[in-house]
Image (tube, coloured by chain):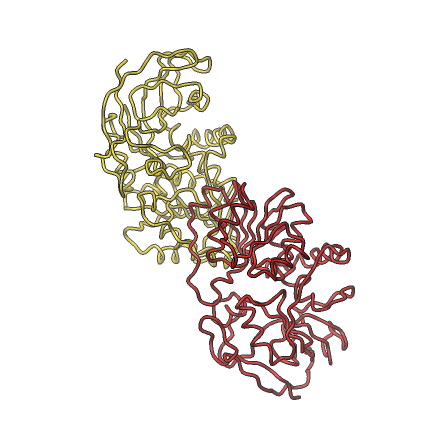
Chain colours: A yellow, B red
Amino acid sequence: MHIEQITLQRTPVGLPDASDFAFGHAELPQPEDGQVLVRVLALSLDPYLRSAMAGRHLSASIGIGDLVRGEGLVEVLASRHPAMAAGEQWVAACGWRSHALLDAAAVAQARRVPAWLDRPTLALGGLGMPGLTAWAGLNRLADARAGDTLVVSAASGPVGATVGQLAKIKGCRVIGIAGGPEKCAWVTGVAGFDACIDYRAEDLRQALDRLCPQGVDVYFDNVGGDTLLALLERLALGARVVLCGLMAQYNGAAPTAINPALLIRARATMRGLVVYDHWDALEQMLTEMKAHYLAGRLQFREDIAEGLQSAPAAFVRLMQGRNQGKALVRL
Amino acid sequence: MHIEQITLQRTPVGLPDASDFAFGHAELPQPEDGQVLVRVLALSLDPYLRSAMAGRHLSASIGIGDLVRGEGLVEVLASRHPAMAAGEQWVAACGWRSHALLDAAAVAQARRVPAWLDRPTLALGGLGMPGLTAWAGLNRLADARAGDTLVVSAASGPVGATVGQLAKIKGCRVIGIAGGPEKCAWVTGVAGFDACIDYRAEDLRQALDRLCPQGVDVYFDNVGGDTLLALLERLALGARVVLCGLMAQYNGAAPTAINPALLIRARATMRGLVVYDHWDALEQMLTEMKAHYLAGRLQFREDIAEGLQSAPAAFVRLMQGRNQGKALVRL
């Protein structure tokens, strides 16, 4: 069977470029016992892939000539595994290609798209891994409570937007940080945050001082870099900081340099979050978020590129922070 | 009344020098209502005073011409406050002087030396504020458990030695870090740690790799600097890091620069400790530690200089790390 695929052509230096990737074709054999043939309906583009391309991520590296990894929304075409049946929709580690053969390990890690989900691509975003990231960070690591002032960066992204909306439901005062007026307008106007700082348009430190005069109780960090440093200078006593992503250094910038004296001064707790540790909470997360979503209390935004060949350019836009919501490629 | 005192003559630059201080005399009035006149028996020398002299500490700054602050073991000479009676021994904020007039606020913060304590100066060390620091960090922040590999820096100091001994009692495997063979010999031979790394004699990273092949579950940091960075590179999954002191930067070195990616990789929790938050636990700490101390399970070491005039030189030795145990000045 002839399929389309995208491989890594060159290890990106700094910001990735579409020419770092190559579009091509491959043969895909028919499924053997324990395997499942799927068609990819949509690909999820995630910043961690940039680290994997640099060999710096916890997950396996993506080397030159390798199929670009990544999860997608898939439809089962032919199954020789008892867990999946033709016609079903799943989220699976398919990679950047039109069709994939899932082996038993990939089937074991795949997640069925919930039947109640009217937009199946949300299983790649706010109701999928990014949603679980937000839920676990907020509930298991940040101990966010009603009345807390919570700040979240990359606020219009699938993790940030979910963090902020769940925190609002908990009764927190929620301030987002995002780049550009369009993102900020969505964060306050649609996602319902109390405020959103456009760090490209105003001085972040001044804006934080104005919006958080009592300091910050919870900072959910998706970016690292100078944004993290600015927040550490403004922690309230007993603050909690969740380290979730380091967008500022994924493209190769020098590591963020935290001064531990700031954590001592605030008696702060800083914790590193890796979503892989929290799959056990997926059902609990979905149960809670289903209720909020169906009641209209959770809004999700998607930035959808069309066609597999658009994936490299869409990934570059994501790493430039130019996406508006969860970055997807529809095939 | 004529008393002896030491004032700050010059704000130290880098390592303090004895000439930064001035010995002199002052008049002390008789106590009025609500005040207590005390004689100072012993002064506690603590690294945080260096930060206070630089105006960088949470507590009030020590400016040029000011009496050097600090706690001491005092004996009540004359009291016009109902809480204190002549002849009693207390730990109080007396400053570097032979006698002090405590006002109501100082009386309220003072702590009576426990009657069972055969060495009253221990109320300035392992059974006082440094002991409470160790107890609170270990029990409230680090969540140290039997079987954990715990590393503590400044291991022969009053905080570090207490941390390690309490952790041994809990069933942890305890590795100390200290400078010089004499300190290390005391840490393993008397305080009973499993090992002690002499960071001046061997490469810290190699020693940690040898002694902690499975990584470090708890790191109790009293120093910051490169020692902290070396430990962050070696955290086990789910590790806890307690930030208690930053000896490496008290003398003015550049702030330690932590890379947050290390915390994410280890899913670590890092928390800032300030002992002032934990005075509510003093009685509980003393109850527990009294039992261990009287049973011979806790060893404390004191480094005692003689006479008020020796305080500046003793403080310089402390800030050079040349003290052997809790730094005190006996008057």
**Residue A246, placed above or below residue B252:** above
Where is the N terminus of chain A found, in terms of image quarters? top left
Answer with the quarter of the image where residue A70 lies.
Answer: top left
Which of the two residues, A19 or A201, is positioned nearer the viewer here?
A19
Name the outermost residue toward the left: A19
**Residue B23, placed above or below residue A198:** below
Question: Do we see residue B105 in this rendering?
Answer: no
A287 sits left or right of B275 in the view? left
Q: Position of residue B116 (x, y in %)?
A: 78, 64
B184 sits left or right of A172 in the view? right
A159 sits left or right of B107 in the view? left
Q: Position of residue A306 (x, y in %)?
A: 24, 27
Which of the two residues, B229 or B129, is positioned nearer the viewer here?
B229
Q: How many marks?
A: 0
**Residue A301, placed above or below residue B329:** above
Q: Residue at x 43, y 20 (%)?
A: A107
Answer with the quarter of the image where residue B42 lies.
Answer: bottom right
Where is the C terminus of chain A found, in terms of image quarters? top left
Q: Position of residue A61 (x, y in %)?
A: 36, 33
Q: Position of residue A220 (x, y in %)?
A: 43, 45
Which of the two residues, B198 or A123, is positioned nearer the viewer here?
B198
